[in-house]
Amino acid sequence: MTIKPYIALLAMSAAVSTAWADDDSRFTISGFGTAALTATNTSDAEFARPNQAAGVTTSPRTGPDSNFGIQLTAKATDWLSFTGQGLVRKNVTDNFGAELAWAFAKAKVSDNLSFRVGRVGLPVYMISDYRNVGYANTMIRPPVEMYTQVPMESLDGADVVYQNSFGETSITAQFAYGKTDSDNYAGFTAKLRNMSSINLVAENGPFTFRFGRVDAKLTIDDYSGLNTIVGALTKYGFSSIANNMVVNDTKASFTSVGLGVDWKNIVVQAEYGKRKTASIAVPDTTSWYTMVGYRIGQFLPYVNHASATQDSARTVAGLPTTGPLQVLAIGANSVASAAPLQTSNSIGVRWDFNKSAALKVQIDRMSPGAGSNGTFINVKPGFTGPVTVYAAGIDFVF
Amino acid sequence: MKNLIKKITFALGLSSFAIAVNAAELVVIVNPANPATSMTSAQASQFFLGKSPMFTPVDQAESSPLRAEFYKKICDKDPSEVKAIWSKLVFTGKASAPKEYHSNAEVKKAIAANPTGIGYIEVSAVDSSVKVITALH
């Protein structure tokens, strides 16, 4: 945790007092949060959201699913505005820490076109931009099977957003370019450079269709496990395998489609995505989920099924499987099989008990695949699953 | 009063609705300078759900029964569903939620002052400062 986000939050709260003193409402302040308790039925592994360093076992904790965000928008002119959002949650360290989620200047060139410069949301997924806003979502959290594939949430650079309606269909097209550094809970830093992102959304009445594609050059720094095995492979004459494992300026992409339906009482949300990289240390994966809900007054019960599988081989061919050098194969295979295999079934309900708050209860049954710990962390030897995850929380906006 | 309503609705070329007029009937209004003459409620709902930035929607007060009735009629949604939709846009910095006004008169004044404004009021409050583009039943 660095000092900078705190300064940003302080600056924001200073700006808040200005906002309340200001009558012409050039400043808008809004916020969101979730207060939740999460627990599981096992002590052999911890359940956590993507990139959290610590999770929960059998004792309920607030860590995985609670957060608090505050956003300030200042309108300089009719066409120019500034937005900053601070987010407090548990992420790569086992503490609630403040982050500067976004901070950008937005220029509205016309009714249809706007440019943003600064730190903007990285639209990897359908609900990327509001994944942390519990109130805006049906489920208590984005399905971990899918949202663990690309943990980066923002992009430092610029984007252009085009929005238009054709009859009753509205189209939003977003193109972003920039870079991002993402600290991983495991201690390394993933750097995405030359990152481009396309996000296309078409909405017609109750239907939303979405296509997204992110391309980047990926470099992983300070990943000691990877560096050790790459070094050993090179030393013992397996340099071509080592080269396939190095993550340095490596081509990486994520392609996904999404569907949203909100028709009469029926609510559907589904996504399908594929991750591809040129390194066997960042495996190619496929992930998807489908949620179906049915609204009954203020209650929205739902079920969800999610899956994460690996497309590239989980073992590295061409290494000795016996003798003293088989340790190389063991090491290489552990790197090549780092992607979580998991399916889960969830059931839950959202209750809009108040105009600005919703209560959610969700139970997940998560089954790690063979030879994988799934999305679970700090796993004890012999852990297999399946695991039941219980969560209850209140989402609010203001 | 009833006569007046009839006159107004007639003047707006909406005489066919006059029979059905009652105090709770809602109409979608825009600035008289707006070139749009009529639209379907599905088209109008796009602006109130943040799906089109072409017009600037304004809302009635959160506690107003008109607000609940309006969203029920125009898109069959509860105010909390609408709020969830807007929170998706607000917290990505893509749009600001509609400004709230506390009466038909205030909404009308805001629309009359904003060439791209779009709002909703009871039909009984309509006058020449605004233009009706959709009536909701």
Image (cartoon, rainbow, N blue to C red):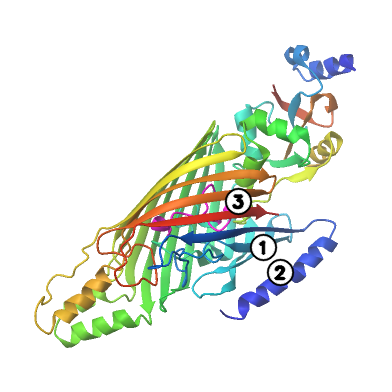
In which quarter of the view is residue A313 placed? bottom left
> Hey, what amino acid is under mark 2?
Met
Q: Is residue B51 left or right of residue A238?
A: right
Q: Nearer the viewer, residue B115 or A180?
A: A180
Q: Which residues are magenta?
A: A130-147
Question: Which quarter of the rendered picture does the C terminus of chain A lie within?
Answer: bottom right
Q: Picture coordinates of residue A309 (x, y %)?
A: 29, 56
Q: Is residue A293 above or below residue B10?
A: below
Ranked by sequence position, the earlier of labels 2 and 1 is 2
Instruction: State the SS at label 3.
Output: helix
- Residue A141 among magenta residues: yes
Kind of residue at badge 3 = Tyr
Q: Which residue is mark 1?
A: A70
Counting residues from the start of the chain, the first of labels 3 and 1 encountered is: 1
Which residue corresponds to mark 2? Answer: A12
Circle 1: element type: strand
Q: Which residue is mark 3?
A: A135
For residue A299, above or below residue A6? above
Which residue is found at the position 74% from the left and 27% from the top? B27
Q: Nearer the viewer, mark 3 or mark 2?
A: 3
